Amino acid sequence: MSYTSVLGGRHHRFDTLARLLASASPERSGDRLAGLAATSEQERVAARWALADVPLTEFLAEPLIPYETDDVTRLILDTHDAAAFAPVAGLTVGEFREWLLSPGADAGALAALAPGLTPEMVAAVSKLMGNADLVAVARKVRVVTAFRSTIGLPGRLATRLQPNHPTDDPAGVAAALLDGLLLGSGDAVIGINPATDSPKAVRDLLELLDGVIQRYAIPTQSCVLCHVTTSVDLMSRGAPVDLVFQSIAGTQAANASFGVTLGLLDEAYEAALALERGTVGQNVMYFETGQGSALSAGAHHGVDQQTVEARAYAVARRYDPLLVNTVVGFIGPEYLYDGRQILRAALEDHFCGKLLGLPMGLDICYTNHADADDDDIATMLTMLGVAGASFVICTPGGDDIMLNYQSASYHDALYLREVLGLRPAPEFETWLDSIGLLDEKGGIRETTGAAHPLTAIGKELAA
Amino acid sequence: MSEVAVQTSELWSSLRQRTQARIGLGRAGSALPTRHRLELQAAHAAARDAVHSPFEPDVIAAGLAGTPTVRVRSSAPDRLTYLQRPDLGRRLDPTDRAHLPMGEWDAVFVVADGLSSRAVHEHAAAVVRETAARLEDWHLAPVVLAEQARVALGDDVAQAMGAAMVVVLVGERPGMSAADSLGAYLTYRPTPGVTTDADRNCLSNIRPPLGLSYTGAAEKLAGLMTRARQLGLTGVNLKDETDALPG
C-alpha cells in the first residue's frame, strides 16, 4: 500500500507506512544517518498531508515490523484493547490530533483510551503536532504510581537523586547523596548508575542506600541501575532490591542487543513483586529508553527513531512501572544534533509515553559534542514542567562525573518547583518537613549543612 | 564567617575529598551562586573548544621528529558533517586512500582527531615515539595523521596499506573534568565494516600527569602488540597482562 499527496506542484509518493512516518518526522540527525529522513522540507510536509488522512485502524492492519519476527509487534497487537480504542476508531491521524486537543479529551477520557492506543498511533499523531500541542495534550494526562512515595499527582514534580561515582566509592556516593537530600531531591528514586555490573559492587551500593533510607525513614525507593539479570540474581540472594531497572528499546533485536527478552523481564517483575517492599504501592519496575538506541544497535528495521522509541513504551507498560524516563540527548549528536532536536524529542517522548499510560519522566541532558548547553536544559525543563512530567533526573551541579554528561541539577528542580508552584511527592514532602527542610512557603530551606542531622550520613561515611 | 558557616565549609571540604562531584555549591535563591555557574560554563567551554578546534597535523609531525608521516582525511568533509555522520568518519577519502603506501608492514599507527584535537596535539606524538622505541625489530609503516576520523578509520587504513595491525590514537569525547584524554585502540588484521569493538583492545585516559603516563601507555601497548602478533588476534581473547585494564 502506498501513500500520496500533492504539494508545491509535485506529486509525492511514499511506498510504505514506515517510509511515510519517517518522512513526516521533524528533522533529526539520526533519521538522516539511517537514510530515512525526508529529502526536502516540502517532502516532509507532503508526508504530513498524506499521514493526516491515514485511518488509525491502518496501524493495526499494517505492522511496521512483521508480527512473525518481532515480539514487540506481537506484544502491541496481542494486547490491543479494541473496546478502549472504540471512541477514536473511526478517526484519521489528522482528526485524532484535533480530538486530542479538544476539551472533551480530558484526563478521564485519555486514561480510558490508553489501552486502546498503539505506539505507532501516538508516534504518528505526534508528527502532526507542534511543540505546544505536545505540551497541551500531555499535561491533561495524569499517571499515578506508587512504591514508598506517590509519583505523578497533579501539582507535583518528583526527582531522581543521582549520586553517581566513577568507582562506586561508598563515601563519594554518600557525599553526593547528602548533597541531593539537602536540596530536597530523591522522591522519585535514589538511583545510581554503577561503574561495574559486578553483583558484589551492586549489592554494596544497594545496602548503602537501603541503610540510609531505613535509618532516616525516607519515604522513597532506591535503585542501582544494573542489568536485569544481575537484579534477579541479587533478589534470589536476599539483597534489598526496591526497583528492578532495565534499559529497553522498541524492537526484539534491539532488546536482544541489551541482553533482554520479554521472558527475562517477566521473571524479574514477578520476583520484585514477591518481595513486597513497597508501602503505599507495588509498582516495582524502572525503565530507561532513548531515541536512537535501536539504530545504534542496527535493529531499527527501517522505522524512524521516534516511532521505534514509542514502541519501547509498549514493553514498559506491560510491567506497570513506577518510573519510566527517556534519556534524551545522551546518545550524541549523530542522533539528536542540537538543543532544538533534543527539545523536540523530549516533548515527543513525554507525550507518547503519557498517552500510552506511562509514568513518564525525563533525563534532560546533553553531551559535550552536541550543540547544546545549560540554557537548553533550562528551556527543556520549563516546557516539560508545564507539560506535567512526572519526574526529572538531577545530578550535582548538573554534571555527572560517572557518565560524563550534563543533566539537570538539583538547583534546576528547585527552580522548576518555584516558578510553576510544583511540590514534591506528598510522603516525601511530609518527611522533608519533619526534618526541618521545608520553609514556610513549602520550598526547600537553604540549610547550613553542618547543623543538620542528615550530615551524619556524610560524616560517618567520609570518616 | 559565623561558627556555623565555618563548620559547613569544613564539612563540604572534607566531603569533597571523596568525590569530584559538584557538591555543596550553595544557592542564590533556587539557582547556583554566580561563581559555580561560571565554573560550570568554563568546564563546558573547554570541552566544546576541544571538540571544535581544528586538527593540526603539523603539530604531530613536528613532535614525531623525523618519523615519516602521511596525511589523510575521512569521507566527512567538515566538523558539522563529522559529528552527525559517524559512518563517514570511519571511511577514508577515496583520493587519500590511493596515496597510502602499500607494504609488508607489521603495524601502522594512526593518529585520529576523534572528538578532541587537543588530546592528540598534546599526547599522541609522545605515545607513538615511546611505543615505537619498544618495537625495535618491527617493520612500522609511516604514521598516518587522519582528520575528521573515528576509530574504525584505522581498519580502512590498515587494509589499504596491507598492515597486519593498526593502533589508532584518538581524541576521546571531552568531559567536564578532562578535555585532553587520549585513547588507544589496537586491532589485528581488521576488515572494514566487519571488525567490531569486540575485536579491539583499548587503553583510555592517556593524559599525564592525572591519567595514564606516556611510558605506562607505551609499555601496555607494546606488550599488547607483541602478544597480538604471537597469537594472531586482538579483542576479548587478548588480555593485558601488565595489570588489569580499566573498563
Image: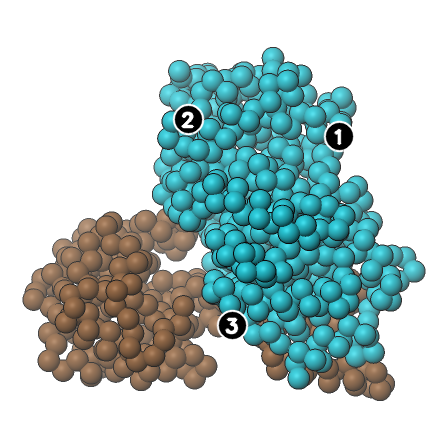
Chain colours: A cyan, B brown
Q: Position of residue A12 (x, y in %)?
A: 41, 20
Label 2: how many residues lie within 10 Å, few (<14), some (14-19) or many (20+)? some
Residue at image coords 70%, 61%? A410
Residue at image coords 66%, 42%? A359
Q: Quadrant location of the N terminus of chain B?
A: bottom right
- Provide the secondary structure element on which disc 1 rests: helix
Question: Image quadrant of residue A69?
Answer: top left
Image mark 1: chain = A
Circles 3 and 1 in contact, beta carbons < 8 Å: no
Q: Amino acid at mark 2?
A: Tyr
Seen from this angle, which residue lies furthest top?
A: A90
Q: CA distance from mark 1 to mark 2?
A: 32 Å
Seen from this angle, which residue lies furthest right?
A: A440
The reply to whether residue A361 is visible in this rendering is: no
Q: Amino acid at mark 3?
A: Thr
Q: Position of residue B127 (x, y in %)?
A: 29, 78
Q: CA distance from mark 3 to mark 1?
A: 44 Å
Query: Which circle marks residue A167 in the picture?
Result: 3
Q: Position of residue A204 (x, y in %)?
A: 57, 69
Residue identified by numbered label 1? A107
Residue identified by numbered label 2? A67
Instruction: Work out whether disc 3 and disc 1 sit on a shared chain.
Output: yes
Q: Quadrant location of the C terminus of chain B?
A: bottom left
As drawn, B54 above or below A359:
below
Residue at image coords 50%, 21%? A59
Question: Image quadrant of residue A86?
Answer: top right
Circles 1 and 2 in contact, beta carbons < 8 Å: no
